[in-house]
Amino acid sequence: KNALYGTSIAHIPIEHDWKVSYKRLEFSELLGEGAFGQVYKASLKPKKKTSKVNSRFVAVKQLKDGASDEEVIELVKEIETMKSLGHHKNVLSFIGQVTDGGKLLMVMEYAPYGNLQEFMRNRRPHLTTEQPVEHFPYLCYRDLVTFARDIACAMTYLESVACLHRDLAARNVLVSDKMVLKIADFGMSRRLNEEDTELKNYYRVHPGGRVPVRWMPPEVLTEGRFTFKADVWSYGVVLWEIGTLGGNPFSDVEPSQLAHELLRGRTLTASPYVAPYLCQTMSNLLSDCLNIDEKMRPCFRELLHKTDYLLESLN
Ligand code: ADE
């Protein structure tokens, strides 16, 4: 079996011109709320009333009222990035944009199980006698390794198309049917052009923007220097989130102190939810990704091969 299964350069756009008419959307509940935008669930009706195609659920991102020009530009950039990415089974698909009536909405694939962080938290074994409000089946080790593999697969693809994600975290990964993961939230991502890729492979963080400090490696925190190896560090933090079923990384460290602490050797260690026989492999991967020296961190292709191998060994 090819570990890169699902990677496809051939890209068939769902809407050729990416334009979606506002009238085709029927909004329902709020799925998520960020600093400047909201994501709603909606039903997208077919283009023609006579169509035999059914309505489908979509997720629609819109800016809050009174959004600034910068925020509009950020959303436009996110839309452009998503449009430019080809199709991959572990990357959330872009469906189109609404531009009617001076509003800009981003229409994307709907992931029925929401974000990975909450998904895992809801499935923690409850260690108290209190019954949970709603009962979800627990996750098994195989599920956790599959999560690690799916994310590595998406990131290998993003690197192959020169897309830095820059905000990889369990809250930005969505869970779709059959627990297939989809990387989402390209609000901070950047496509590197060929020149950048060949030249130095890095991108500087804009000062003043929101920053996911606890997912960032020391070279980003101290120099704002971003390479794919920074995404690899974030991937390591996500492995820890998976191992703790949605824990808060470095929760006892002040954001302003994090770089200092990391350089003093502070790290994340394996977690109570992972079985001992998996623990060693997972925690080795974790510490490989959280290497202070970015050159020593593995690349996503290696991480994909290792997680895929680990998964195969569980069969
Ligand atoms: N929350 C944010 N984006 C979402 C999406 N595309 N599907 C489901 N929940 C979401």
Image (tube, grey):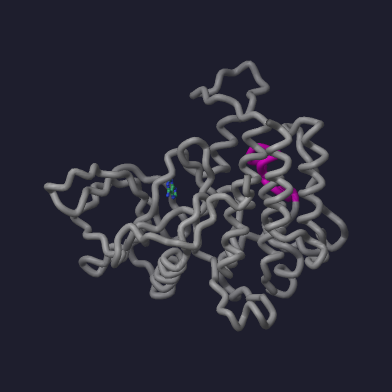
Q: Residue at x 47, y 59 (%)?
A: 35
Q: Is residue 44 above or below residue 272?
A: below
Magenta residues (range)? 241-252
| 44 in the magenta segment | no
Residue sticking out furthest to the top: 129
Q: Say whether residue 96 is left or right of residue 237.
A: left
Image height of 30 relative to 88, above or below: above
Q: How many marks?
A: 0
Residue 213 in the image: state x and y as whole percent: 66, 60
Which is nearer the eye, 79 or 132?
Answer: 79
Which part of the image, by quadrant, shows the N terminus?
Answer: top right
Is residue 243 within the magenta segment? Answer: yes
x, y (%) of residue 145? 67, 39
Q: Is residue 290 left or right of residue 176?
A: right
- Specify the quadrant that holds the C terminus: top right
The residue at the point 69 percent across, 74 percent down is: 225
Dominant secondary structure, magenta: loop
Find residue 294 and report its horizontal and vertical position in percent. Answer: 78, 66
Residue at point 77% right, 49% down? 286
Residue found farthest to the front: 1
**What residue is drawn where x is 60% and y is 83%?**
195
The quadrant holding residue 277 is top right
